[in-house]
């Protein structure tokens, strides 16, 4: 990839059918440093914009792609100006003439590869769906920032994140779906962040500024893979039955009885909303006592936000509180949450 003064991020490396080295990545907007857009380069030629047709003020990130006899297939995560992120897919005979993106579902990270769809929750869990069944990969205590895979070995997925309560020490875990083996990937003496791997080559996003996501792509010169057991996988042969056994809080009832919009990431559940808000309340108290749990508090507010999509007023109340905390460190109004929940319960 040619040098650029702009920030670059989220690499995905593969070789096309003509054996050309093809690198997808994101580039920051020059006028707005964190408005990322998709680009690609072939054989290290000048970067080309991958035109998505999505609005200019949306963020595009986390590209993955493959090429077969029918043409190119690209997946990406795009976030609209309201902050809602979705997984999209594009197809076309050439990268210059791709179809309009198709929204698959709400997701902050994930990918599509052939018959496989993988989606990462904000905390702890990656869901993998393919012809072999439904799997849940758990990394306890982790925030999930990116889920990708190796183009040279698509059964090896790459999960990037960091640890709840820690001081921004990112990692990438390589997880082999064929045998459950795992490697912690280190590049140049540190945990690789949002990296791509093809053969012996690794590119990762190296931090270059004061902000955590101020990064540029770097080709690793010193690579080390450490065998580990960070994650645990569970296979759901019958996800409905499993849900019945493990979650008796109303979620299954809502999924069956309500007409859930396909863009809603999960059935709404008032009990789960209360659970996450209760956890957020406890964590807020610990933050006041000096514990560095900011990300954990944001995570629980986000989970409550996702679980409340069926009830617009409650959903917006939680969303606004979460954003106010992220932007201005304003502690949520817990009484306001309680009143909004009571209104939902009274109307049920």
Image (spheres, helix red, strand yellow):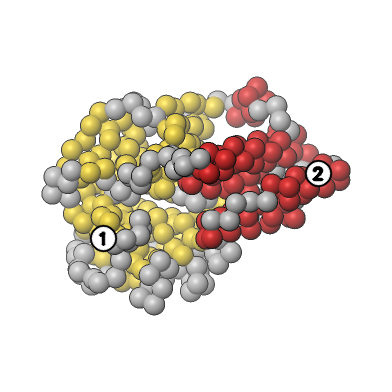
Q: Is residue 154 left or right of residue 272?
A: left
Name which quarter of the figure residue 273 lies in.
top right
Give the secondary structure at mark 2.
helix
Q: Residue 246: image x %, image y %?
A: 63, 24
Q: Residues within 10 Å of mark 1 (few under 14, many from 20)?
A: few
Q: Is residue 159 left or right of residue 43?
A: right
User: What label does residue 208 carry, if any?
Assistant: 1
175 to 217, vertically: above or below? above
Asked if marks 1 and 2 touch (Cβ < 8 Å), the reply is: no
Q: Residue 289: image x %, image y %?
A: 51, 40
98 to 287, vertically: above or below? below
155 and 315: which is toward the camera: 315
User: What label does residue 342 carry, if any?
Assistant: 2
User: What label does residue 101 carry, if any?
Assistant: none
173 to 310, vertically: above or below? above
Image quarter hosting the C terminus? top right
Kindly give the residue lying farthest to the bottom in the view shown. 31
Residue lying at 44% horizontally and 31% vertically, measured from the top left: 140
Q: Residue 283: image x %, image y %?
A: 55, 39
Give the secondary structure at mark 1.
loop
Inter-mark Cα distance, 1 to 2: 47 Å
Kindly give the residue lying farthest to the front in the view shown. 289
281 and 313: which is toward the camera: 281
50 and 31: which is toward the camera: 31
Residue lying at 17% horizontally and 46% vertically, measured from the top left: 188
Residue lying at 53% horizontally and 56% vertically, measured from the top left: 329
Residue lying at 25% horizontally and 55% vertically, measured from the top left: 206
């Amino acid at each position: 990839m040619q040098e650029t003064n702009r920030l670059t991020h989220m690499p995905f490396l593969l070789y096309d059918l003509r054996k050309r080295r093809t690198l997808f990545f994101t580039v920051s907007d020059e006028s707005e440093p964190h408005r990322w857009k998709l680009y690609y380069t072939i054989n290290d030629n000048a970067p080309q914009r991958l035109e998505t047709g999505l609005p200019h003020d949306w963020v595009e990130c986390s590209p993955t792609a493959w090429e077969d006899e029918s043409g190119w297939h690209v997946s990406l995560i795009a976030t609209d100006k309201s902050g809602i992120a979705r997984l999209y897919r594009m197809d076309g005979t050439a990268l210059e003439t791709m179809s309009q993106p198709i929204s698959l579902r709400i997701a902050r990270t994930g990918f599509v590869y052939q018959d496989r769809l993988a989606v990462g929750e904000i905390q702890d869990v990656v869901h993998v769906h393919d012809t072999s069944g439904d799997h849940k990969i758990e990394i306890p205590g982790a925030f999930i920032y990116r889920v990708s895979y190796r183009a040279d070995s698509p059964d090896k997925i790459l999960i990037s994140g960091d640890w709840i309560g820690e001081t921004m020490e990112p990692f990438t875990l390589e997880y082999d779906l064929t045998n459950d083996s795992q490697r912690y990937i280190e590049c140049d003496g540190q945990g690789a962040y949002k990296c791509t791997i093809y053969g012996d080559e690794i590119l990762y996003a190296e931090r270059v500024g004061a902000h955590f996501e101020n990064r540029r792509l770097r080709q690793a010169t010193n690579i080390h893979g450490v065998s580990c057991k960070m994650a645990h996988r569970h296979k759901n042969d019958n996800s409905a039955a499993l849900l019945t056994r493990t979650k008796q809080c109303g979620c299954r009832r809502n999924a069956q009885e309500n007409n859930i919009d396909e863009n809603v990431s999960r059935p709404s559940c008032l009990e789960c909303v209360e659970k996450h808000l209760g956890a957020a309340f406890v964590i807020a108290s610990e933050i006041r006592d000096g514990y560095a749990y900011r990300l954990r508090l944001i995570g629980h507010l986000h989970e409550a936000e996702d679980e409340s999509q069926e009830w617009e007023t409650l959903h917006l109340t939680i969303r606004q509180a979460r954003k106010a905390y992220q932007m201005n460190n304003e502690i949520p109004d817990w009484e306001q949450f309680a009143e909004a929940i009571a209104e939902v319960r009274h109307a049920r």
